[in-house]
Image (cartoon, rainbow, N blue to C red):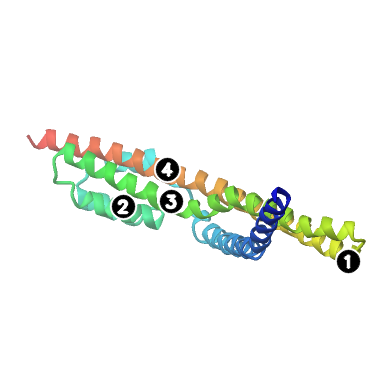
Amino acid sequence: MIDFSLISVKSVLHAITSALLIPTIAILFLFMALTIVELGSLIVEIIVERRKVKINIPELVADFQGKDSEYIMDKIEHSSLFKRQKAVFSEWVKYSYLPIGSLQALASKLLIREELHYDKITSKTDIVVRLGPMFGLMATLIPLGPGLIALGQGDTKTLADSLLTAFDATVSGLASAGVAFFISKLRKGWYEDYVSSVESLMECLLEVFEHEREIKK
């Protein structure tokens, strides 16, 4: 009775793990497709954004000294800032009449929103980096069971097919994770620089606005 129960448990476990093979391979295909899409998106981003000359923040702030918000916005619109950075400043500078404390709170809110936006972009490849090797390992181990059984029965063809599936799954998972890691690392460096530039410029502009108000008093 005990042996029969043990065999039943093993059969159920084997059936469950065997049934997981196709979903696991499907997820690996999804990870590879997502990685290819994100790689294409990265190339487009390099072509569209990375060719721009990096803005000189101190020089831009120096030009803002003593100028009104209308001049500042015009200068920002014609600067080499990225499109999304310009949109943030457009939204922020139009409320330059608010008290300094309110402007600081608004700046913090906008910066957090930008960080969340960029985190959402990199989270896709971060998922592939974390889960790609895991599903690759699962799709590697699952076929080895039938392969070992086939080896015991002298069925070398089934063994070869199982090993081929296992190796392909390992390579797919690791390749997707490796490319995704490169994309995430590169983008995070860019986005940290984007947000840092916006934050520095906002801090400098706050000083400009505060100085203007002291002069008008």
Question: Measured from the top left, where is residue 110 in percent x and y?
Answer: 29, 47
Q: Earlier in the sequence, mark 2 or mark 1?
A: 2
What type is the residue that disc 4 sits on?
Answer: Asn
Query: Of helix, strand and loop, which one carries label 4?
Result: loop
The mark lying in front, picked from 3 and 2, is 3
Left or right: 50 with respect to 88?
right
Residue 173 in view here? no
Residue 45 screen position, x and y as percent = 52, 59
Identify the residue at image location x=45%, y=43%: 192
Q: Earlier in the sequence, mark 4 or mark 2?
A: 4
Residue type pointed to by label 2? Val
Cβ atoms at labels 4 and 2 below 8 Å apart: no
Query: In whole angstroms, how far apart are the C-alphas of marks 2 and 1?
Result: 61 Å
Residue to which mark 1 is pinned = 157
Question: Badge 4 local density, few (<14 within 10 Å), some, or many (20+)?
Answer: few
How far is the residue under mark 4 from the one under mark 2? 18 Å
Label 3: element kind = helix
What is the three-letter code of the residue carrying label 3? Tyr
In the image, residue 17 above or below residue 109: below
Residue 88: mark: 2
Q: Nearer the viewer, mark 4 or mark 1?
A: 1
Residue 104: x percent and y percent? 23, 39
Task: Answer left or right for 184 relative to 177.
Answer: left
The residue that mark 3 highlights is 118
Which of the numbered marks, if any, corresponds to residue 56? 4
The one nearer the camera, 132 or 92, is 132
Secondary structure beneath disc 1? helix
Residue 20 lies, in percent from the top left, at 63, 61
**Residue at mark 1 to residue at mark 3: CA–CA distance:** 49 Å
Q: Earlier in the sequence, mark 3 or mark 2?
A: 2
Callout 2 environment at 10 Å: few (<14), some (14 to 19), or many (20+)? some
